[in-house]
Amino acid sequence: MINQLSLTFAAVLLLASPGPSKAGPPCEIPYHVQAWTQWFDRDDPSGSGDWENLADLRKENPGKICRDPRDIEAVTLSGLSVGQAGEAILMYDTTSGFVCRNIDQPDKWCNDYKVRFSCAPDTCENVCWTKWYNRDRPSASGDWETLNDLQKEYPGQICAEPLYIEAVTTDEEIPAIRTGDNFYRYSPTVGFACRNQDQTSGYCKDYKVRFGCLACP
């Protein structure tokens, strides 16, 4: 479960629009705005494992990773998430980076992973925002506004790899990170998910989401 205070892949708070639109570059960027680095793949699992540790990545890619990353994402080169790969991971955090050791795996071999980090943007960018989407209600297990489902239900409307995501409540448009709810997923590449079981109240609020891309689909 990801706590709402530490979870922030959201974007600049702008009013909803009827469809994709170019938003002016926000030069006063709130704390909760984040941007992703490029993907890094410095190691292969042919030795003791796959070592994508932050210190070595910084040495090999000077100036490309911010001083204090806010999040980290790792996927296999074939596109599987860490959860989907199902391997035992030694390190997976914003201070150490990512390490998968062959010795920790049942078959003594790790997948080959790539990693990227989320940082506060230090430059102004023109972001193309999608419209708002609200495909689910929290009446069952929770509110699931996942990117994969939204792309299936709205083909061609959302870019393949969004860089930003914003979630607000459907009634008063309160930013998700200010509601006090805990979020299971809140990522531009995964989408948004709030599970009822993770809430002290037993119930999620109803959310809508939109995505920010560098180019309109």
Image (cartoon, helix red, strand yellow):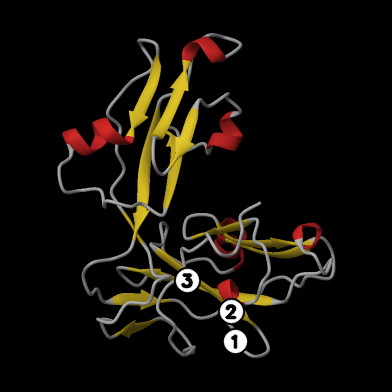
Q: Nearer the viewer, residue 191 or 10?
A: 10
Q: Position of residue 119 (x, y in %)?
A: 33, 58
Circle 1/circle 2 CB separation < 8 Å: yes
Q: Mark 1 sits on what residue?
A: 173
**What SS does tag 1 mark?**
loop
Mark 3 vs mark 2, CA separation in Å: 19 Å
Hey, what amino acid is under mark 3?
Answer: Gln
Q: Which quadrant: the C terminus?
A: bottom left
Give the side of residue 207 with respect to residue 214, left or right.
Answer: right
Residue lying at 33% horizontally and 63% vertically, measured from the top left: 120
Task: Select label 3 or label 1 by which is in front.
Answer: 1
Task: Select label 3 or label 2 by which is in front.
Answer: 2
Residue lying at 33% horizontally and 52% vertically, measured from the top left: 68
Q: Is residue 77 visible?
A: no
Give the side of residue 116 with respect to residue 125, left or right.
Answer: right
Hey, what amino acid is under mark 1?
Answer: Glu
Circle 3/circle 1 CB separation < 8 Å: no
Which one is earlier in the sequence, the residue at label 3 or at label 2?
3
Q: Vertically, is 27 above or below 3? A: below
Which one is earlier in the sequence, the residue at label 1 or at label 2?
2
Which mark is drawn over residue 157? 3
Q: Position of residue 164 (x, y in %)?
A: 41, 66
Q: Quadrant of residue 209?
A: bottom right
Q: Mark 2 sits on what residue?
A: 168
